[in-house]
Amino acid sequence: MGAGTGSGRGQLFLRSLLFLLLVGPPARGQLRYAVPEELEHGAFVANLGEDLGLDVSTLSARRFRIVSRAGARQHLEVNLENGILFVNERIDREEVCEAGGTCLLHLQLLVESPLELYRVEVEVLDINDHAPTFPWQEYVLEVAESAVLGARFPLESAQDPDVGTNSVHTYRLSPNGFFSLEVQTRSDASKFAELVLERALDREQQRVHRVLLTALDGGVPERSGTAHILVTVLDANDNVPAFDQPSYGVSLPEDAPAGTLVIQLNATDLDEGPNGEIEYSFSGHAPPRVRELFHVEPRSGQVLLKGRLDYERASLHELYVQAKDRGPSAVAVHCRVLVHLLDVNDNAPEVTLTSVSTPVLEDAPPGTVIAVISVLDRDSGDNGRVSCEVGPNVPFELRSSFRNYYTLVTTQALDREVVPEYNVSITARDMGSPALVTRSTLTIPVSDVNDNAPRFLQPSYSVYVMENNAPGASICSVSALDPDCQQNAYLSYSIADGHIHGMPVGTYVSINSDSGHMYALRSLDYEQIRSFQIQVQAQDAGFPPLSANVTVHIFVLDQNDNAPVIVSPLPRNGSVATELVPRSARPGYLVGTVSAVDADAGLNSRLSYQLLQATDFTLFSLAPDTGELRTLRSFLEQDASRQQLVVQVRDGGQPALSATMSLLLSVVETMPQTLSDFSEFSLPPEVSSSSPLTLYLLVSLGSISFTFLFAILILTAIRCRGERRSRQGDSCSPPRCRCCPGSRPSSDGLKTSNLTAQPPAGTTAATCLDVPAGGPPGYCYKVCLGPESAQSDFMFLKPCSPPRNNEKDPGKRSRPDQHLQVSKEAKQPNTDWQPPSTQRPALKRYRIQLWGNRGSGWKGDMGKGEVMSDTALN
């Protein structure tokens, strides 16, 4: 028998394995396998690593495991080295699944990094490890001798804990001459046997009949159980009890108290006396669980509740009650009572945190899984339907992945600087009435990410430092804040690279990297640098580091550390400055202007002039603001011809600084054509080099002059080119001239008018310019100007003219490239000629321009040449 059983288990295991290979795993996330019961420890179930598509080498690192409730037996286990699901302990299907039907083990598999959840169902297949058994080894069946042929006598059924084909399949009766056996099938597919009378009994011939009843299951190999039936032939009690109906159904709430009436059974017997008195009892094959929960009153037929019902353990109880009269040869009749339990909402939901990934980074994207939560309610129907939700005002939500499984995920970006920690309340509520609620709190800390750059307390800093400061002195302090924490909030300060007047900024200032205090590394000079700016950077210690910059404006305050410098007049050859003054000078005559500069600024550079010493204080005065030296009265015969003056220039600083100079004035009868010392108004090298303003002015003036000259040349070229195009076929050819007159010459010939202005005797020769007239085409005029006017930058270009009829020498003709004619000898002006009225305004403007461009000296006399020209124009 044992060898047959082992061979049967092996064949069943092979069939189960073949079924698993043919069916294959279901969709990803939920797999189903089948395994026979009673396998030894370590038996192979499935290769989860291969079926789930997981890397076997990472199962241990990712904590691949089976999640089960606390206290539950671990029948199956996973080998983390190869991902194989194996039997951890022996599985007894009849112990694991008390009720019949499909026996399933529900496994929840969890793997982390990333967090994934899989559901696996393992069906425990029944093997034929139990033989059918009868409640008793011997039954006594009393049969009246008056029993008719074909009478049926139900026999006690055999019980087999196995299911399906391994349960009771049929019955067999040992050969005899009076009885046969018929096997009946109940509504639940269970089998029971009835003894059928095939031949009339005769108590006088044989009072007792012995037969052997054998129950067989459908397993391979089949198992069997036997019971001896002792048939006693009685005298006739020819009526048996009868129930109102063969089967009863009743519903009962699971929370019904003990003593509750389940059903009132009623059976009748047509006999009288003891043969009609009926007794009720459970049939012999009523399971022990039914006898623990229910009780049958023998006399009244009431079925009462005796134990505590539990819908979650069994929702249906099947009771078999028999009724038998008290007469001789009593025959028991049976009925079935189906007790349906009604579920009551007596189980609150259970919330289990399967896996928690905390703390969570504040830069975690929305949808990041924080925890896996399982919710279980043992009730059924609406009482077992659970809804799960999180508290309000939190950036989290629950998403349902499987039935009764939720993942807690983020819904928006987190900010540790706003909320460093969340207490998430998870509420599970079933749909019963009244609803039962379970609350659980999950604390989720938020870890810091370097997502905030430092921020300075001010948008910019302005620092005022007095010049001549001590090197190394603190000049200011900058401060920044970073809302991050730990190393992400640790700040270090530095100065950005740059140059100040060609020198690295690090040679001027330094900064303490921890405190932000700034120090001057050198003594600053207001006259060399008045202000500068530096960029200070604050950088945190996060990864990657974040930084912020701020501009620090440093203004150098002036001190009165520079004395005035007299720049005009300057002494000649190291001696005192000299100047000539005409004796005929009237009061208020401007002798000259004393000019001085001070490198300081503000009040420190405001200068005042005064005479400290003078040969005669009544003769000269010095303007305190402008430094103009003027005569107070006319010179007298007794006044000395040499006047010694000492001039002092004082600034407005505290304390005031000053400079003095000596000036020697010579009183003469006539003034020579020499420049005075007052005209030498050039700055000393140390002054001009120290002031960048002078350089800026020179560069600006040079640029403007060059631009103006370039524009004049372009405009002239454009105009000449336009005139050439408009006068195609003109008699003036390009080799002869550079600019053609406004119209073609007439056939009568060209007329030329010559104007020669000669200065009087004793003057320098005048410069003659050919000026184009505004009269008829082809006329040219000459204007004689003085030597000073010849220094003007303005030039008038005359149009070329063909040779005159009375000009015989071709060598005297004007060359095409000759635009300026200079007369080498002085000529008397021609007073008979007067320019046309249309030319006078143009010539007057030219004279005014020439005067405006003369060298503007201190004492300028108008040249006589200009006077002559003005006379000729008027």
Image: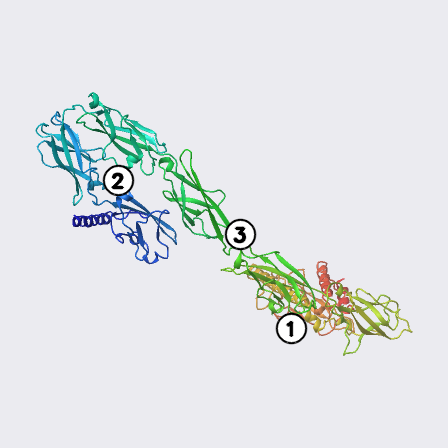
What residue would you read off at disc 3? 417
| Image mark for residue 101 | 2
Disc 1/disc 3 C-alpha distance (Å): 99 Å
What residue would you read off at disc 1? 812
Nearer the observer, 338 or 321: 321
Nearer the observer, 237 or 635: 237
Q: Amino acid at mark 2?
A: Gly
When asked about the image quadrant of residue 520, the answer is bottom right
Taking 235 as reference, is 697 above or below it? below
Disc 3/disc 2 C-alpha distance (Å): 58 Å
Instruction: Tell which circle, 2 or 1, labels the residue nearer the N-terminal end.
Output: 2
Taking 550 as reference, is 502 above or below it? below
Instruction: Tell which circle, 3 or 2, labels the residue nearer the N-terminal end.
Output: 2
Q: Residue at x 62, y 71 (%)?
A: 815
Instruction: Tell which circle, 1 or 3, labels the residue nearer the N-terminal end.
Output: 3
Q: Could you classify mark 3 by the number of other residues whose Cα lies within 10 Å: few (under 14), some (14-19), or many (20 or more)? A: some
In the rendered structure, the answer to whether residue 398 lies left or right of residue 219 reads: right
